[in-house]
Image: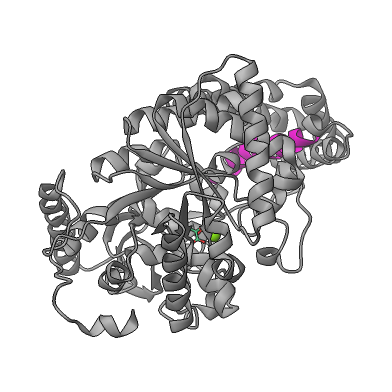
Amino acid sequence: MQVATGKSILNGIAIGPLRIYKKDETETTVNSSLTPEEEYARFDAARVKAQEQLGVLYDKALDEVGEENAAIFEIHQMMLEDDDLLDSVKSIIDTQGATAEYAVATAGDNLAAAFAAMEDAYMRARATDIKDISRRVVNILTGQSDGDLLDDKPAILVADDLTPSETVQLDKSKLLGFITRHGSSNSHTAILARTMNIPALIGVDFQDDWDGKMAVIDGYNSCVYIEPAAELLTAMEEKRSNDLKQEALLQTLKKKPNITLDGREIKVYANIGNASDVGLVIQNDAQGIGLFRSEFIYLDSQDYPTEDQQFLLYKRVVETMAGKKVIIRTLDIGADKQADYFELDKEENPALGYRAIRICLTRKDIFKTQLRAILRASAFGTVSIMFPMVISVREVRDAKELLEECRAELKERGVAMGEVEIGIMVETPAAVMMAEELAEEVQFFSLGTNDLTQYTLAIDRQNPKLDNFYDSHHPAVLRMIKHTVEAGHRHGCWVGICGELGADQTLTETFLRMGLDELSVSPSAVLPLRKLIRSLDLSKTSEVQKLT
Ligand code: PEP
Ligand code: MG
């Protein structure tokens, strides 16, 4: 048995085989020992298999995200029949005596480069699709995973790093847990793991020969056991079954109010990153959705999602929540959340760069497409809109003006819309300091403590080396929160927290005493938080009062 340590993202146990995911590192052998005819036959067989995989993906996407979103997999199937690609692969095999994998990788790179240089934005975006299909065929030829775990059994995924867009595309039903060598506990990949309730370890120095071996992630002790001894495995299975029992016990809190012993009530909402997470929200009985990170729709897409595509996803979430509040945060792309087709420049300081509302206010067509989709969904339930990364009153006014333009356009089209509450994320020190003025513009504030900690303490939340310095309990951060609550309340705004700190049970009493109206947390944290809130008595004096 081998033991490796890391940093735990979620307290929990995962048991299963390890699966090492290698991306874009496939070393392809160049020279073939087979005849060109034999190599081409290998390529053709892999191509057919790739088309079968894409057919399975199409059916899955059709079920989960509808026909329009699923269409991309049909396009990929067609691309695999494209003469330019097939001719190029054949020519490289024939003229260079190359292996099929080298030929398809090279032909894919060449074609992708040609598309990337085109004038038309739609054609440029196809470069990513070409890379995607050539990687799929290469992976089949070299026996590597294609990264979507689809043809495989449930496994613990092991990777150097996972980007938010890779994480969002993983097949959650087969993902038991994940382990990465890099990454920080405040990154969006870590947040996604918490939302999905998946045990995960980061900072693990894994070895290639772990692939396929049985393992246990022990999230409580921040370690992973490779080929655990029988006794340990039994103990871990017991621990896991206890966890499941605890979870079942928490279910008895369903439908109970989030109210302290002395009668103070607070709303507990859930954060989601995907329309399909709404099932977890219902299962954990959250009173609403306090943060729908809409940018994950963009990350899960090969091209700008259209108004109709977005509308259908928002509508599905809003309908499922059946009248409960759904706060949709407008596009917060940039920094660690990158989608190739946005073609954002590499920046020296991406966290301080061109992102979120800054992109939306300058690329208005993208922003307005999203706003129209949200407004259309508002006819089906209770929708709020929240703008991220705000630093000034001007930005909020500009965003509201665009919203009004969209409302007028939809009215003109005869489209039904509901009332929409408007709020902002308070996640920059500037927004905290401007809270009085900003509160005059909106109906609510939601504190994004992940970024607020980053910007207040001048600590990059992505940098794993700084994890120990990234202290969300720093008095400066807590005072920012308190100031925001007081300023918001003075001007009639309700104030919540949607950053990870909202789920920190060591601060729940402090937050209640500060007067926060809402906490929005990952779905699996809703019932444990409810349990704690119901045990608190604010009428008693307490140590935490000093903080507030
Ligand atoms: C935050 O910054 O606290 C937040 C909720 O937004 P994100 O983590 O998506 O940046
Ligand atoms: Mg943020």
Q: Residue at x 31, y 43 (%)?
A: 281
- Is residue 137 inside the magenta stretch? yes
Left or right: where does residue 129 sit relative to residue 327? right
Residue 373 can be seen in this image: yes
| Depicted 539 relative to depicted 92: above or below | below
Left or right: where does residue 97 sit relative to residue 380? right
Snapshot quadrant of residue 200: bottom left
Left or right: where does residue 316 sit relative to residue 37? left
Q: Residue at x 34, y 30 (%)?
A: 320
Counting from the top left corner in percent of width and height, residue 537 is at 14, 70
Counting from the top left corner in percent of width and height, residue 5 is at 38, 76
Q: Residue at x 41, y 74 (%)?
A: 6
Counting from the top left corner in percent of width and height, residue 246 is at 13, 57
Bounds of the magenta span? 124-144
Q: Is the image coloured rainbow, by chain, by secondary structure, or in one colour?
A: one colour
Say which of 242 and 216 sits in front.
Answer: 242
Say which of 410 and 302 sits in front.
Answer: 410
| Depicted 509 relative to depicted 269: above or below | below
Left or right: where does residue 536 sit relative to residue 205? left
- Is residue 40 inside the magenta stretch? no
Specify the principal SS of the magenta part: helix
Residue 177 can be seen in this image: no
Counting from the top left corner in percent of width and height, residue 41 is at 67, 27
Snapshot quadrant of residue 102: top right
Q: Residue at x 49, y 61 (%)?
A: 448
**Image quarter of the C terminus:** bottom left
Residue reaching furthest to the top: 414
| Depicted 361 relative to depicted 218: above or below | above
